[in-house]
Image: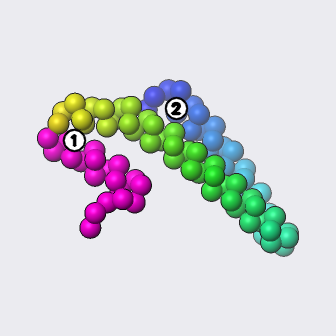
């Protein structure tokens, strides 16, 4: 994993942990539903941001190598990316 991306991803997971703990506390305290939903949506956006970092790392490392290798490796890289975005053909 690329060092900078790893550092940023770990930082985001720490933030996510706190957000999820806060969400659980909001539910436990029976906070206003719309406030709970807003927190849940913020967590979803934070997860999407983490996914972008992980995809970037995968593209810069594994996919670049797999495309350079060609053949079955290239096809596997394409299949992985399609799966990551729920675009695979059935």
Can you give x and y, in whole percent of width and height, for residue 80 in the image? 32, 50
- Picture quarter with the C terminus: bottom left
Relative horizontal placement of residue 23, taking residue 61 as reference (left or right)? right
* Pointer 2 with pointer 1, Cβ within 8 A: no
Give the CA distance from mark 2 to mark 1. 24 Å
Task: Please tell me whether residue 18 belongs to the stretch shown in magenta.
Answer: no
Residue at (63, 49) in percent of width and height: 46
Task: Please tell me whether residue 76 belongs to the stretch shown in magenta.
Answer: yes
- Picture quarter with the N terminus: top left
Can you give x and y, in whole percent of width and height, for residue 53 in the image? 51, 39
Task: Give the labeled residue for mark 1.
Answer: 74
Q: Nearer the viewer, mark 2 or mark 1?
A: 1
- Dot 1 falls on a residue whose secondary structure is helix
Question: Relative to 4, is 47 above or below?
Answer: below
- Dot 2 falls on a residue whose secondary structure is helix
Magenta-drawn stretch, dominant element (helix, strand or loop)? helix
Q: Which residues are magenta?
A: 71-90
Residue at (34, 53) in percent of width and height: 82
Question: Relative to 56, is 81 above or below?
Answer: below
Residue at (59, 38) in percent of width and height: 10
Q: Is residue 29 visible?
A: no
- The circle drawn on residue 86 is none
Can you give x and y, in whole percent of width and height, for residue 35 in the image? 81, 64
Quarter holding residue 61:
top left
Question: Farthest left residue?
Answer: 71
Question: Relative to 34, is 77 above or below?
Answer: above
Residue at (31, 60) in percent of width and height: 88
In front: 47, or 89? Answer: 89
Question: Relative to 26, is 9 above or below?
Answer: above
Question: Exactly how many numbered labels are in the figure?
Answer: 2
Task: Give the labeled residue for mark 2.
Answer: 5
Q: Is residue 13 visible?
A: yes
């Amino acid at each position: 994993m690329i060092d900078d991306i790893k550092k940023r991803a770990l930082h985001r997971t720490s933030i996510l942990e706190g957000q999820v703990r806060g969400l659980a506390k909001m539910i436990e305290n029976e906070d206003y539903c719309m406030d709970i939903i807003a927190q849940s949506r913020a967590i979803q956006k934070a997860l999407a941001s983490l996914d972008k970092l992980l995809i970037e790392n995968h593209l810069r490392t594994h996919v670049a190598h797999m495309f350079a290798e060609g053949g079955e490796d290239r096809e596997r890289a394409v299949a992985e990316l399609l799966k990551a975005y729920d675009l695979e053909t059935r």
